[in-house]
Image (cartoon, helix red, strand yellow):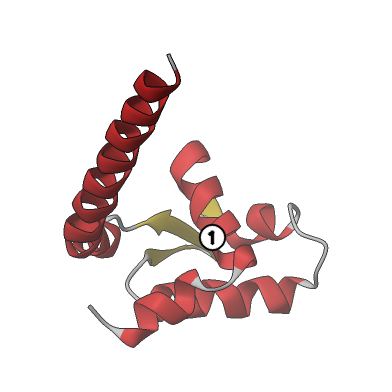
Amino acid sequence: MSDALFTALASPARRRLLELLLREGDQPAGRLAERFDMTRPSVSEHLKVLKDAGLVAESRHGRERRYRLEPEPLMALRDWLSPYERFWREKLADLGTVLDELEDLDD
């Protein structure tokens, strides 16, 4: 797991770019930039950060650059977070048990 991955995911704009690519598939940079209230070069810089982190891939079609989502780093992140998810699920289940016991005492 690289720091570049966490840095890339830290930005709401970059997370939105990933969401658009996930939901709508491969897109040219220009179409992605139309969805943001920032300059096209700023969107391109965000795409570069995502590309450097391995989250998107870029291909050229003539003068157009198209971007697509690369899910492998996200799957690695999911795998890394999995033990923490289990931890919190167990803690919430324990809390539910305590609340149920308190409710039984009130009856």
Residue sitting nearer the eye, 79 or 100: 100
Point 28% across, 32% down: residue: 97
* Residue 25 visible in this rendered orientation of the protein: no
Point 83% across, 62% down: residue: 37
Point 70% across, 78% down: residue: 42
- Residue 67, percent from left and from top: 46, 59
Query: Relative to 79, is 41 above or below?
Result: below
- Residue 84, percent from left and from top: 24, 60
- Residue 3, percent from left and from top: 34, 86
Q: Label 1 amino acid? A: Arg
Residue sitting nearer the eye, 80 or 92: 92
> Residue 80 lies in what quarter of the image?
bottom left
Q: Quadrant of the C terminus?
A: top left
* Residue 96 visible in this rendered orientation of the protein: yes
Residue named by callout 1: 15
> Residue 39 lies in what quarter of the image?
bottom right
Residue sitting nearer the eye, 16 or 42: 16
Point 46% across, 81% down: residue: 7
Lateral position of residue 26 relative to residue 70, left or right: right
